[in-house]
Amino acid sequence: MVEAFDHGGGVRSVAVPIPDNPLGHTLVYVVDTDRGPVLVDTGWDDPDSWDTLTAGLRACGTWAGEVHGVVITHHHPDHHGLSDRVREASGAWVAMHAADAAVVRRTREARPEHWFTYMSAKLAAAGAPAEHLAPLRTPRTLPGLSPALPDREIVPGDLLDLPGRRLRAIWTPGHTPGHVCLHLEEEHPARLPGNGRLFSGDHLLPRITPHVGLYEDPDDATVTDPLGDYLDSLERIGRLAPAEVLPAHQHAFTDAPGRVRELLGHHEERLAGLLALLTEPLTPWQLAERMEWNRPWAEIPYGSRNIAVSEAESHLRRLVKQGRAEPVAGSEPVAYLAV
Ligand SMILES: [Zn+2]
Ligand SMILES: [Zn+2]
């Protein structure tokens, strides 16, 4: 029996399972409006997940056909996977920030050869060894992902179309380039002190830190600074000081400024730890091998190594931008050294 958790004030959540994933669930929020419920995220595209979502909506006293709109915090499949099915069932609009909508468009148009060439060049530049690059030289088909094209753009600072409610978009890039948090500018139903409630997506979670790697765009050579973006958007949410945070995983929590301080401290420690490793020149790959992960490097599977290297690079870019590390002139692949 699927239940919906009542957060009060016309907001409920349904825990939609993510198959074979240690995270377990995506919390899909159901916000009552004068025109029917609006969902914040939809969950993973899987028959069981869909059944859970629809049963959860019934537990909220509504059903999928009644949904007025879908607000997506970011393009990842555990958040945006079921958006097409919800739209088909209801005719609801689906809204997303333009930067993540661009990722969705690229994913839908991606030609496998193009993607594998890009990945193999990028990993080679990061110093990946030949045996890691070899599988990329024989392109396979990409997993059949065809995420839904959103039909509305989430414009930072704007109120969303939730009749009878005040839900404002806050752009919080870092985890993805177009991640948004949604601020419900209404008094907390239990009158907890603070500034409304915040749907935080993956940006601010109570017990884990989201992955912050590089923004992957084969057609854009701009040197972005995703970790810098992430830390700036964290501070922004800390200053907002919502009374309660409604995240997309785990559970609701209070004291957002305290959690923000913890995360800023964690990342500062991590950057300092990396800097201590850069007393000898290291490529991003070599740095990733030496960084601390949740298991030894030798046990990290292939795909997760790509994610780890991407995370090492986002930290290196931050250190370079802060003037704490520098690329070694003439090194190939580029190695970095503490300043
Ligand atoms: Zn995510
Ligand atoms: Zn997520």
Image (spheres, rainbow, N blue to C red):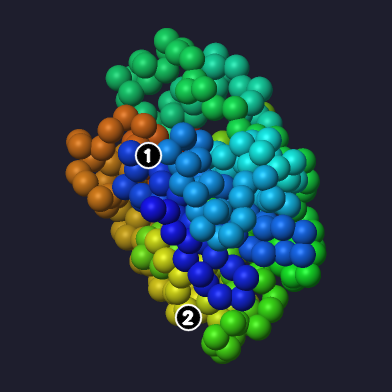
Is residue 121 shown left or right of residue 197? Answer: left
Q: Is residue 170 visible?
A: no
Is residue 154 shown left or right of residue 290? Answer: right
Q: Nearer the viewer, residue 314 or 332?
A: 314
Q: Is mark 1 within 8 Å of ligand 2?
A: no
Quote the CA–CA distance across marks 1 and 2.
31 Å
Q: Secondary structure at mark 2?
A: loop
Q: Secondary structure at mark 1?
A: loop
Q: Nearer the viewer, residue 295 or 47?
A: 47
Q: How many numbered tags mark residues here?
A: 2
Q: Position of residue 276 (x, y in %)?
A: 31, 58
Q: Decide: is 181 above or below 115.
A: below
> Residue 110 sits in which quadrant?
top right
Q: Is residue 39 visible?
A: yes
Name the residue carrying label 1: 19
Nearer the viewer's eye, disc 1 or disc 2? 1
Which residue is depicted at the point 61% across and 50% down? 63
Q: Position of residue 66 (x, y in %)?
A: 69, 50
Give residue 255's mark.
2
Which residue is depicted at the point 34% across and 43% down? 21
Q: Decide: is 6 above or below 275.
A: below
Q: How many residues crowd mark 2 within 10 Å: few (<14), some (14–19), many (20+)?
A: some
Is there a contact, CB below 8 Å, between mark 1 and mark 2? no
Q: Amino acid at mark 1?
A: Pro
Is residue 25 shown left or right of residue 293? Answer: right
Which residue is depicted at the point 67% across and 58% down? 37
